[in-house]
Image (spheres, rainbow, N blue to C red):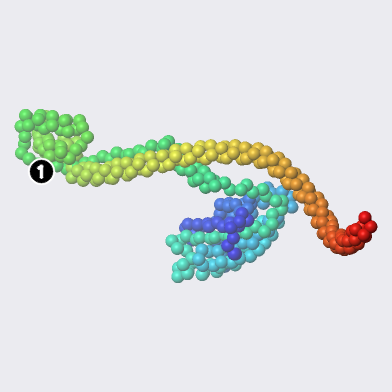
C-alpha cells in the first residue's frame, strides 16, 4: 500500500517465537487499533485444511459491535521481508476475518534455506488502511504528550515493581579437607586446637583463617583423647572435604562480588530510572500548567477579539460612510466639472459677443462725440 500519514492507516508486527513447536490449530495476535477500530492477526501454523500457511486479518470485537456494522479496509499481510500479499475486504458480522488460506506452502516456510524462520521465530506484519466504517467511530486526536505518558506509565509500573520486590541471596555450605595426619598431639595441644577451632567457628569463614583452621583440624584428627566420638566423626568428615570447602568459598566470594557489583549497578540504574520518572511527573505538571495558561490566554484572546471586532465594525461602518460620502462628492464634483466646462464655453461665447459689442459701441461713441462737437 502507498505510504500515507493519516489516522486511517496503521501497521502491526507480530513476533511468534518457537513457531515450529506451536501445537494450537490457530493463533491470534494481541489486538491493535487503527482509526479507532480494533484488529488482530489470525494464523493457522499448520494450515487451514491445506498444506499452506494460512493468514487472516480479524475483527476481535465483532460480537459486541452494533447491529449492521461494517468495516471496509484495504490491507496487506506479510511474512517480514519475504512474502507480501495485499487485498481489500468489507468486514461485517458474518465475515469478521479475511485473508489467505494458501499464503505460502508449509514446506517452503519450514525450509531452512528460505530464511522465513530465523531462530524458530516467525514475524508477521499487517498494514491496514480503513476506507469506511459503519457506524462511524469517534477518534480522539493524539496529544503531543501521549507518547510520554504511555512510556512513563510503563516506567512507573517498573519502578513500583522494583520497590516492592526484594533481592534474596541464598547461602551455600562449604567443606574442605585439611592437611595430612600428624603425630599424636598432647592433651595441651588438643585443648589449644579445640579453642582455636571454636574461635574459627564463631565467625564466618575467611581466607585468612584457612591455615589456622587446617592446623586445628589436623591436630584434633590425630588426637586420641579429649574428643567425643561424634566430634571425631565431624572433624574427619570436614577434613575430608576441606579442599572443596575452600574452593566453594572462593567461588562464592567471586560470585558474591559479581552479585554485589550487579546489585550496585542495578541500584544506580533504578535511581536513574526513578529520577526519570520523577522528572516526568514534574514535566507533566509543568505541561498541565502550560495548558491552563494557554487556555487562559485563549480566553483572553477571545475577549480581545470580541473587543477588536466591535472596534473593527466601527471602523468599517465609518469607512463605509466615508466611501458613501465620497461617492456623493464624486458625483457632485463631476456635475460641477461638467457645469464648469459648459460655463467656460458660454463665457467664451459671451466674451466674443462683448468684444463685438465693444467694437460697435466704440464706433457709436466716436460718431456720438463728433455729432456732439458740431452742435454743442
Report x, y in % for residue 18: 47, 58
Residue 320 in sight here = no
Local packing at callout 1 (Cα closer than 10 Å; few below 14, some 14-19, many 20+) is: some
User: For this view, does 83 lie left or right of residue 161?
Assistant: right
Q: In terms of depth relative to the viewer, which is nearer, 39 or 307?
A: 307
Q: Residue at x 50, y 61 (%)?
A: 122
Q: Quadrant of residue 356?
A: bottom right
Report x, y in % for residue 365: 89, 59
User: For this view, does 69 lie left or right of residue 285?
Assistant: right
Q: In terms of depth relative to the viewer, which is nearer, 328 or 315?
A: 328
Vertical comparison of 14 with 307: above or below? below
Q: In terms of depth relative to the viewer, which is nearer, 283 or 31?
A: 283
User: For this view, does 228 lie left or right of residue 283?
Assistant: left
Q: Residue at x 39, y 42 (%)?
A: 272
Report x, y in % for residue 95: 68, 58
Q: Which residue is under mark 1?
A: 180
Q: In terms of depth relative to the viewer, which is nearer, 219 or 111?
A: 111
Q: Residue at x 61, y 48 (%)?
A: 141
Single out the residue that lies furthest toward the right. 375
Amino acid at each position: 500500500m502507498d505510504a500515507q500519514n493519516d489516522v486511517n492507516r496503521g501497521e502491526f508486527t507480530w513476533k511468534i517465537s518457537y513457531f515450529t513447536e506451536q501445537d494450537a490449530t490457530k493463533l491470534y495476535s494481541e489486538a491493535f487499533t487503527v482509526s479507532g477500530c480494533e484488529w488482530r492477526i489470525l494464523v493457522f501454523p499448520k494450515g487451514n485444511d491445506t498444506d499452506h500457511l494460512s493468514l487472516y486479518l480479524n475483527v476481535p470485537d465483532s460480537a459486541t459491535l452494533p447491529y449492521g456494522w461494517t468495516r471496509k479496509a484495504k490491507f496487506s499481510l506479510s511474512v517480514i521481508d519475504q512474502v507480501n500479499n495485499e487485498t481489500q475486504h468489507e468486514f461485517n458480522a458474518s465475515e469478521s476475518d479475511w485473508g489467505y488460506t494458501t499464503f505460502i506452502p508449509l514446506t517452503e516456510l519450514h525450509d531452512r534455506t528460505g530464511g522465513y524462520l530465523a531462530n524458530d521465530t516467525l514475524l508477521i506484519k499487517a498494514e491496514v488502511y480503513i476506507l469506511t466504517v459503519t457506524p462511524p467511530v469517534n477518534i480522539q486526536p493524539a496529544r503531543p504528550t501521549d507518547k510520554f505518558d504511555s512510556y512513563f506509565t510503563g516506567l512507573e509500573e517498573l519502578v513500583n515493581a522494583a520497590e516492592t520486590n526484594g533481592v534474596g541471596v541464598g547461602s551455600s555450605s562449604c567443606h574442605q579437607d585439611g592437611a595430612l595426619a600428624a603425630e599424636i598431639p598432647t592433651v595441651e595441644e588438643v585443648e589449644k586446637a579445640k579453642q582455636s577451632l571454636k574461635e574459627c567457628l564463631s565467625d564466618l569463614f575467611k581466607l585468612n583463617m584457612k591455615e589456622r583452621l587446617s592446623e586445628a583440624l589436623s591436630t584434633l584428627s590425630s588426637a586420641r583423647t579429649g574428643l567425643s566420638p561424634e566430634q571425631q566423626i565431624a572433624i574427619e568428615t570436614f577434613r575430608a572435604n576441606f579442599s572443596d570447602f575452600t574452593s566453594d568459598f572462593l567461588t562464592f566470594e567471586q560470585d558474591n562480588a559479581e552479585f554485589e557489583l550487579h546489585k550496585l549497578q542495578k541500584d544506580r540504574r533504578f535511581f536513574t530510572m526513578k529520577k526519570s520518572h520523577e522528572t516526568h511527573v514534574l514535566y507533566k505538571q509543568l505541561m498541565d500548567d502550560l495548558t491552563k495558561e494557554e487556555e487562559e490566554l485563549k480566553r483572553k484572546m477571545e475577549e480581545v477579539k470580541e473587543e477588536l471586532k466591535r472596534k473593527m465594525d466601527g471602523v468599517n461602518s465609518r469607512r463605509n460612510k466615508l466611501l458613501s460620502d465620497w461617492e456623493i462628492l464624486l458625483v457632485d464634483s463631476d456635475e460641477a466639472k461638467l457645469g464648469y466646462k459648459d460655463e467656460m464655453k458660454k463665457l467664451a461665447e459671451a466674451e466674443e459677443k462683448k468684444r463685438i459689442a465693444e467694437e460697435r459701441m466704440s464706433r457709436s461713441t466716436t460718431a456720438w462725440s463728433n455729432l456732439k462737437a458740431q452742435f454743442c
